[in-house]
Image (spheres, rainbow, N blue to C red):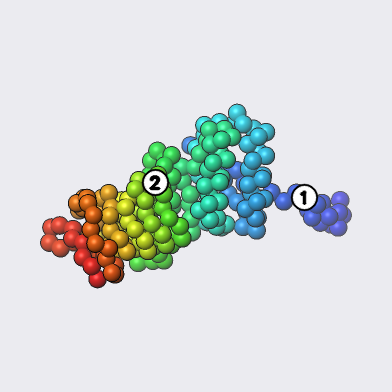
Amino acid sequence: MQKSDHITRMENQEFIPLQIKANREGFVLLPEEAASFQAVFAYLKNRLEHSRDFFRHTKMVLDLRFRVFSIEEIQSIDSLLKESCGAGLVEIKLKEGFSLFTERRERIIVPPPASKDVEGVPLIVRQTCRSGARIVSQSDCLVLGDVNPGAEVIAYGDVVVFGSLRGLAHAGAAGNRHAKIWALSMEPNQLRIADMVAVPPRGSKPVPKRYEVALVRGESIEVVTV
């Protein structure tokens, strides 16, 4: 076969927007960097329709280290998996070693940092965290929205919520008691800093004019306005 024929055949090959790789526990979904979400979604839907029994009730990991999706797009993929074959996402791998775990997770493995004083690129969540979501960051975590009841935000550094914190927040998860939890409104189910746990009192309270910060003082967690 001449070289020109080989090039022509390569050019005519169908572009596959999504790789589906088997692992010990299920499958890894790896979108191509240049693929649109629409192409990835359509390809996955077609594969599920033609191999419904093969993927039935399996665990899926969505690898987004090379192709970023929005929260809505991730939720669309998870809904497609559930509706098509009873499968679902148990982990979403992100850039910089971060992972987001869904409510269908069965185990969580987060490698510990080299030291308790973690420095690195913060994980930015540009969305409200709804019930069932669990976000894990090996550095600081910034949430540009609310953290609803039933949602969890865990960070080895600080947790900063540009909204209302009504779920669970855990700062300094590797043992750093100097970490803090910041929120415009602090009404959490539970606060954790390093190895310390606090459950704030329920009931109405005045809306703070500025940020509320949870931090360790002595052997307890206190919430102050700054």
* Residue 207: percent from left, percent from top: 27, 63
Residue 55 placement: quadrant? top right
Residue at 63% over, 47% down? 41
Nearer to us in this view, 206 or 146: 206
Q: Label 1's element?
A: loop
Left of 50 or right of it: where is 105? left
- Residue drawn at the location 37% of the way across and 51% of the way down: 148
Residue 190 image point, x, y percent: 26, 50
Residue labelled with disc 2: 131
Q: What residue do we see at 38% from left, 41% from top? A: 107
For marks 2 and 1, give the one nearer the viewer: 2
Residue nearest the viewer, comparing 196 with 114: 196
**Which circle marks residue 50 in the picture?**
none
Percent coordinates x, y for residue 173 in the rendering: 29, 55
- Tell me if residue 141 comes above or below residue 91 in the rendering: below
Q: Residue at x 57, y 32 (%)?
A: 85
Neighbour tally class for label 2: few under 14, some 14-19, many 20 plus, Cα within 10 Å: some
Under tag 2, what secondary structure?
loop
Q: Which mark is residue 13?
A: 1
Front-most of 159 and 174? 159
**Given the image, on which type of amino acid does mark 1 rest?**
Gln
Category of crowding for the residue at label 1, using alpha-carbon neighbours closer than 10 angstroms: few (below 14), some (14–19), many (at least 20): few
